[in-house]
Each structure stands twice: as structure tokens, then as C-alpha cells.
Image (tube, coloured by chain):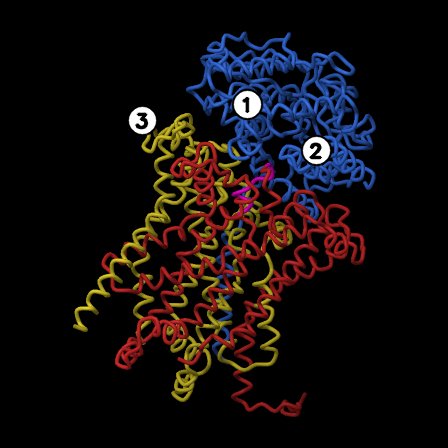
Amino acid sequence: MSNPKSGTVKLSAAAKREQNWGWLMVAPTIIGLVVLNVWPFIQTLYASFCEHLGFGHYRFLGIDNYVTMFKSPEFWKATWNTVYFCILTVPVGIFLALLVAILLNAKVKGKGFFRSVFFLPMVCAPAAITMVWRWIFNSDYGILNQMMGTSINWVTDSKVVMIACAVVAVWSAIGYDAVLLLSGLQNISKSYYEAAEIDGAGKITQFFHITLPMVSPTLFVVLIMRLMASMKVYDLIYMMVEDTNPALTSVQSLMYLFYRESFVASNRGYGSAIVIWTVFLIGIVTVIQFVGQKKWVNYEV
Amino acid sequence: MKNSSMGQSKKIVTTVTYAALILGSLVMIFPFLWMILTSSKTVPESMQIPPTIFPAQITFENFTRVMESLPFVSLYWNTALMILFRVVCAVAFSSMAGYAFAKLQFKGKNLLFSIVLMQMMMPSQIFIIPQYQMVAKLGAANSIFALVFPGLVSAFGTFFLRQAYLGIPNEIGEAAYLDGCNQWQSFTKVMFPLTSSSVAALTVFTAVFAYGDLMWPLVVNSDLKMMTLSSGLATLRGQFTTNFPVLMAGSLLAMLPMVILYLFFQRQFIEGVAMTGGK
Amino acid sequence: MKKIPRIAAIVLAVTLLLMSLAGCSAADGKTHLTFQIWDVAQRDGMQAICDAYTAQNPDVVIEVQVTSWNEYWTKLEAAAESNTMPDIFWMHTNQILYYSDFGMLADVTDLYDDVDPNFYSDHYSEISLSNAMGSDGRIYGVPKDKDNICLVYNKEMFDAAGVSYPDESWTWDDLTEASQKIYDTTGKYGYLAYADDQLGYWNFVYQAGGYILNEDKTQAGFTHPATQKAMKFYIGLQSNDWCPDQSYFAQTAPGVAFFSEAGSMFLEGNWNLRQEMLDYPNMVGKWDVAVLPKCPDPVSGDGRATISNGLCYSTAARGKNLELVKDVLKFFGSEEGQRIQGLSGAAVPAYDGLEETWISAFDQFDYDLNLGIVVDQFEYCVQSVNNASRPKWKSLVSDELIKIYSGQVDIDTGLANMQQMVDNASAVS
């Protein structure tokens, strides 16, 4: 290596410096991710092909865990529950967040007050939020049934429990999504609207031709983030629905199933297979989004 | 003619806007209101049918009960420190990495960025046991460091700030370069300040995430004095099962400082966002 | 590239700062031990025992740490794998076989040999010792406490309905009759029969002469006629108007329902009684405890049973301070250590003859609960059900029970399924 320029790819001195800076600047993040996340993930991947004998001792099995998993109705139910939760939270949640952002971006009095109110759940611990919602949803003593004059078992009826969880999820996230979208909306220059106004474009045309394309990069971030969070949902359901709840199987997400298999029943091999499946699903959805974004996300401002 | 119809439709739009905002606000505020009302009721009253809206007799017993069970001052302090360090780490490391991924050319860039994307797909629950074992090996369980540990680097932050840097035209960096700045200087002096609204958003995201993180603090810090507000609340729930007045009192106490802080903080935050918006 | 040192310095500074926040290691020359438990209510009691030990051994500091039940086991297992277990920790019968069979726990069978080779059998009951034993019959923890399940009832509701209080003569029939009468007169729920094992159907199964696991713990007894009889009775209680369904209990714990005067009876472990006296001061004097009602026509036996469990204090087999910790454990199991535990009200000491110390911890209250029955019930108590594969079948069985309750499977099929689940899991290990 006496002559550094003898490589097949010749880099100018400036480009080389740039490369060194690049490596240096990503180093802390990459090293951290490899140690904290990638290595444990590789272990999980290995464990998914093993039987857990106890205390971190594994016996190699091959694909048995996956065979058992794909044959298990409980597993397919959990997969469906996860997809259902995403359907309930992502489109509806983002639509409402965009609506709130647009309303907040309008010229209204007391804007500051409304903003504070919508963002309030952001600063509240989810543990506290789920507690109060469980109390509101309580079918015997809860205020919701009393106000509506109904006796719906919000958190114990297998047909409505997922909706109840989705309500809490959307309610909690709407403020954060709206703040991101709002910052995107405020980045849109007023001159675009003025120009459109002169051209005689209506509000709705303006929304689809100016607002939506201009806010699309932010929308993309929000979509990715929300979808990933929803596919990995665990904490919220765990806190809303305890394992003595008769409706558990109707709301048990993939990560909840993983928790019960890996942490409670100590079936870590099988639990790992569930994780790999979850990551696989998220991967597919993400790839679709990144490919799809070229069609609708507009980075040229 | 045209003007008056315009004015009329504008009025309708304004009315609908207000109606929607007020209705939305009611939905957002009601759970908090109910939390406050429940926290000052006795347990039998909370389970009365039909329920009372306002407590028949305001009791502070639930609050004293909660304060006997949890060392709130420590919980506030631990949570604040955990959030502070996680935010500092996430912003510092993710800004550097986000800038590099967006603006610099280097070998292995795509491969390294795919690590970032992959991490975002992985559910955090699978890291709990391995990360706990790392902390335990370091002999650092039951400390602030242990609370911060999984948040030392942030894949989401890197992804998010890369988006922000992508949004800044390359010409700005090139101009700085021509002025004689090296990469580091053009990053710290020119580019980083331009991402302030994204950094603010990331700060909030990291803080909210850290604040809500439940299982990690529960597993890694078992000393009650080293817990965070979220894990303290979970402990409270383990102790009081479905005694909602006590749980609501605990939730209120846990939320209060954050809410107050937020009421001061949100002005700067939103105005900061608005300020950079026009450019 | 002269800026690199500056970045490195920043990174280093942040790392150092974080490290400095990491647990400050002891610089006082004392040996620091950690003691992990899961019950907040017993924290003070445990601290009192530790203080008594450290008073005699000033060069030792013991720190009591509490982790919630669920995370306790996640954490302990992770710690066992990386050999970073706490110095002393509570062990539960649900888990002791899993840990001891894997060689994670220190064998303390010979702990008292220098004092008295028969120390354990002289001072601890057979049940207490078997709760602390591994599959190999060795002792892997110093017995800590013993408990059983009793019937808690609301006196005011009994008075209002004109029903006499539960006593030794009570049978299952009295339980249902009283429930009906109380419901008819007061509109309050009767006996709150919820889907729990230790605090629910197990007691009834053993009263009827059935069993959950056979003698050598290799097979389940869910298809045994006596077990089926008890299960059908217990699950059937839910169909009465006076009993809320499982959906109710999923949202309102039976204890909370009872102490907010929504129901008149429930089964409670004696370890919770003291905390409930403290937590519900307005209820003191309005409720009391009684022995469990017996099965009127058991398939075998006299119809009496209550599930008794007991914890033990364990330590890691490969702990750093093993010799010192063994000395601490020795103190915990001594009469003195057990007496402090009883007097603090934490739990009934496992040490025979110290039951009264626990009762005396209730002297602070204005009303005297009939706690003598807890001691009486040890006469016919049954050891809490357990085998090495219980962690694997526990949640399967409870899921199946929920299915029976909600009508997704009929009771005979459900019980047959449970039988198979336990048998399969037990056969594997």
C-alpha cells in the first residue's frame, strides 16, 4: 500500500477526505446499532431455528419452529390482529392528524390553545393514558357506557376490543403526527397559494395540487413511522388487555404473542420465529412504501 | 356580488373550523378531566351506579396513598435525566450520521444505511434481554446510565434527520465549501442550524418515546428510587390492580410536571417550527 | 483532519459523563449485597431482617430491591444466564424446579449442619421444605414463609340478608345459598368466583378429592371424576345472577370489587390481608375472614382443603459472595430472622411455632380479624401445584379455562384439552 492511488477506484484527495468524514460521522451510530441491536437480532435469528432448553441454552432444530408456527391458528390470528390494528390506526390516524394540522394551520383565534390541547397526550406517559381509558371503557362502572346508555364490553368483547385499543392509539398519536405535518404545512410558501388564487383555482384544487404534494415528504415520514409502530404494537395492548381477559385472543398482536411465548412460557425459540416473521412483514411493507414513494412523494420544492 | 358570496362561504368555513376544533378538543380533554374527577373520589363512590360526575366529597386520600407508595421526587428526577441524555445522544449522533448519509459520498454508504433501516423494523422487545445482560455485565444496573443505554444511538433519528438534510439544497453546502469550510465546519456552521425545526421535532419524539418506555426501565432498574415515572406507574398498577381512584391520582402526579413543562416549552417549539417555515 | 481529536473528545466526554452516572461502586470498604423481591408490601419487613443481620455484621450492607412480578422473572432469568444474579432473591414454587434443575441455585441442604443436622425437619413443615426442594430432593432455598387461602366476607351484607357468618360447618351449598340471599336482599354480588388457580378452582378441586397433578407430578388430573366435579361446580357459579362473569373480573379485580362493597365474598391469600387493612381504612371492622367452605360430598377425603404455598430465600450457585451470602441466609432461616419477618407483618413465618408473631402484627388495627383460622387451616392444607414444566403449561391452561368460561369450548372438551396440555408439557421435560 505504498501508493494509495493504486486502487481500481481512483479518488481525488477531496473525495477521499469526504469519504473519511463520512465514515467518521456515521461511526458512533453504526457501532451503537451493531452492538445494541444488530447482534441481538442475529442471536434472535439463530434462536428461531432452535429449541430453548432454558437459561440461554439452545438445541438446533432446523425449521421446526416455523412449521409449528405456520400450523398454529393462534399465530395466524395474531397476524390478522396486527394487520387489523394497522388498518384501524394508520389510515384513520393519519387522516385525522392531517385534518387537525390543516385546521391548526388556518387563521383561527385561540390557535395556541387548540394546539396545546391536541398535543397534550404527547407529554403523558402511555401507562397513565391506558389506565384512564381502561377506566372510561369499564363496562360496569365506566363513564362511556353510562353516557351512551349502553352496556358494551369495550375491552372484553372480542368484537369491539380492537376498536377500543385503536381509539386509544389514535388518540395518543394524533398530536405528534399533527405537529410533524403542521411543520410540513408551514414550510409551504404562501406565494404558491397566491399564484393559484390568481389562476382561479378553488380550495380543493389547491389542496390536491399544492398542499398534498408539498407536504408529501413529511407525510411519508409520518406514514412509515406510524405503520412501523403499529406493526410492532405491544405496550398499548399489554396495558389495555390483561392475560385474564376473555377477549385476549382477539386482540393479541404478534409482539404480544412473542412476549407470552418468550418471556412468560420461556419458549424462546418459537418466540424468536414470531419476531422474524414480524420483521419480515414490516420489511415487505417498508419496501413497498419506499418503492411506492417515487410515485407520490415530491422532494423538489 | 362575488365578494359577498366569498365572504359568506368564508364564514361557513370558519364556523366549521371552529366547530371541528372545539369538538376535537373536547375529545382530547375529556380523559384528563375524568382522571382529575376520579382521583378525588373514594373507591366506593367511583364504583357507584349510576356514577357521579363530581365527587360527592373531595378526598385527597388517594394522593397521600400514592405518595406513600412511590418516591415521586426521585421519579421526576430520573425521568428528566434519562430524557435529557437520550435527547443529547440522539441529536448529536443522529445529526452527524444523518448529514453524512444525505450529503457525503463514501464507500459502504448504502450497506450502512440499510443497518439503520433494519433497526427501525426490529421490535424493541427482542433487545431487552441481551441489553439487560450487557448492562449487568458492566455492573451498571440500577443507574441513570442503564436507563439511557438503549437510547445511546437512534436509528429513527438518523433516518429522520437524513430526510431533513436531503431537503436542503446541495448548493448551500457547496457554497460553504468554496468559502473554505471543511466538511465538519460546513456541517456544524451551515447545515446543522438549518435543521433546527427537525431537531426540535426529534427532541420531542425522543423525549416522548423515552418518557413512555415501560419495559426497559422496569427490567433494568428495580430499585424504586431509580425508576422512571412510567415504570413507577406500572408498579403502582401491580400494587393497586383496578383501584382506579388511586391509579388516577398516581397518573396525575406523574403527568403534572411534564404537562407544566410542556405548556412553557410548546410556545418556543411551535414558534421555532414556524420561524424556519417561511424560508 | 485536525478536528478529529475534538470530535473524539466530545464523544469521550459524553461517554464519561454517562459512565459517571452509572452506579457508584462502593468505596466504603463494606461488602454490598443486593436482595431482590417482588412484593412492595413486604419491603419494610425484609429490610428489618437485613438490618438485624447488618447490626451484627457491620461490614455488610444489604440493599432490598423490588421488581414487579412479571419483570422479576424476565430479569432473573436473564441475570442467571449472564451470571449476574442478585446476591439474595425470593424463589417461588412456580419456578424453583426450573432454576434448580438447571443448576442455577446454590444447594443449601447442609447449611445448618454445624448447628443441628436436623434443623430443617425440626423447624419446618414438610410442605415448606418441599416448596424449597429441587427435583433431586435437595434444598435450594431457606424456607421463608407459608400461606394459605381463606374466605373473606362482608359482615354488613350478611347482617342485612340475615345470614349467619361463615364458619367451620360451611359447605359449598352454604356458599351458594348465602350468595343468593345476599343478592336478593341487598342487590350486591355474592361470592366473586373468578378464573384463578391458586385463589380459585384449585382449592375446590382438592376439597372434592381431585387433583391437578398426580403424586409424582408426571400427569394431570383434569379428567379425574373428582376434579371434573369441582371444576363444573366452580365454573358453573358464574351462571348465577349473584356472580359477575369473567369479563367483569378482567376489568375490576375481585379484591377491589369486595372492598368497594360491590360483592360480599371472595377468596384471598392471607398475605394480602394486612395490606388490605391498610389500604381500605374505612372498611376496617366491616369484614372478616373464615375457613374455606368444605365439599359436602367429596369423592374422597373429608372435603377440606386449602392451597398452601411458600417462598424461600435463594442465592446463585455461582455467586461471587457465596460464603457470605450463605451466612446471611442462615440468619434469615433462623428463629430470630423468622420472628422479625412475622412481627413486621410481612408474612407468616415458615418456621414452626411462630405463626402468632404474624397475628400480632395486626394489633395496630382497631378491629381484630379472626386470623386464628389461617393457622388452623395449615392442618389440612395442600401444597401449591407445581412441576418443572409448569411455566410452559400455566398460560396454556389458563387460556383454555377462559375459553370454557366464554363458551368457546364445552367443559368436558376443555378439561380434556387441559389434561393433554399438561401431560404433553410434563412429558417433554
Confirm whether residue B189 shows in the render: yes
Q: Colour of chain A?
A: red
Residue C65, position as x, y percentages in the image: 56, 37
Image side of residue A266 versus residue B79, left or right: right
Q: Which chain is yellow?
A: B
Residue range highlighted in magenta:
A237-244
Camera-nearest residue between B142 and C310: C310
Q: Residue at x 57, y 72 (%)?
A: B113
Magenta span contains residue B87: no
**Circle 2: element type:** loop
Residue denoted by label 1: C241
Magenta span contains residue A242: yes
Q: Which mark is residue C410?
A: 2
**Circle 3: element type:** loop
Residue denoted by label 3: B57
Camera-nearest residue between B119 and A240: A240
